[in-house]
Amino acid sequence: ASSRNGFRSKAVVPHFHFVSSQSITTIYHILLSRSIFNMLSSTRRLLPSASSLTSNNCSIASRATSMMFSRGMTILSSESKEEFKKENYNARMAKTRRPVSPHVTIYSFPICALASITTRVTGCALSFGAAGLGALELIGGNGTALSLMSDIGNSGLVLSSGAKFAVAFPIVYHYFGGLRHLVWDNAPEMLTNMDVEKTSYGLIGASVLVSGVALVV
């Protein structure tokens, strides 16, 4: 390049200094160490010295230490392992004075859960009842189940009424429960919390009412 007076001047070429990744990492570690050192220095200035602790603070620290070391610890040894095997789960939980999980006795079941559980219980009762009648016919011969039911019906008002209700309620309840699920399958918009609660009360009430009719029939 030429200057204004005609003389040639040297071109200024910029020099780029390339820094390797290792150098960048080293610089980063130096800066990080420096910041940590400054933080520790400022924290040390804020913390009181050992000579400035009062007797009250020392007593609190000693009490906390004694409470920490007085807490029960699990000793892993062969003897404790054998004792642990001998004790069952309920015995171990009884020592801790904590409720055994699942602690069903403290649960408050909603009416929806009770209705759902009753549907399953009545279904199992019907299955076992049908299987029992079939087994009775196979073992005792034709007409054995009918003869047994006739004997129960003629055994007195209390026993016959209880037997009728015990047979009628599972049939009626399970049948009405199946109809309710059939309605929900065809009308899912009715499957809400409020509607389920209302139909649960209706299901139990209707089943008890219809089963009660079997006592006088």
Image (spheres, rainbow, N blue to C red):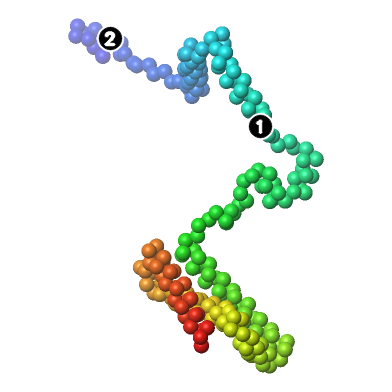
Q: Residues within 10 Å of mark 1 (few under 14, many from 20)?
A: few
Which residue: 26% across, 9% down? 8
Which residue: 34% across, 16% down? 14
Residue matched to label 2: 9
The quadrant in which residue 76 appears is top right
Q: Nearer the viewer, residue 155 or 109?
A: 155
Query: Mark 2 or mark 1: which comes first in sequence?
Result: 2
The quadrant in which residue 188 appears is bottom left
Q: Nearer the viewer, residue 147 or 123?
A: 147
- Label 2 secondary element: loop
The three-letter amino acid code for the residue at tag 1 is: Arg
Residue matched to label 1: 71
**176 displayed left or right of 84:** left
Q: Disc 2 to disc 1, how far (Cα)?
A: 87 Å
63 w.r.t. 210: above or below: above
Q: Nearer the viewer, residue 45 or 102?
A: 102
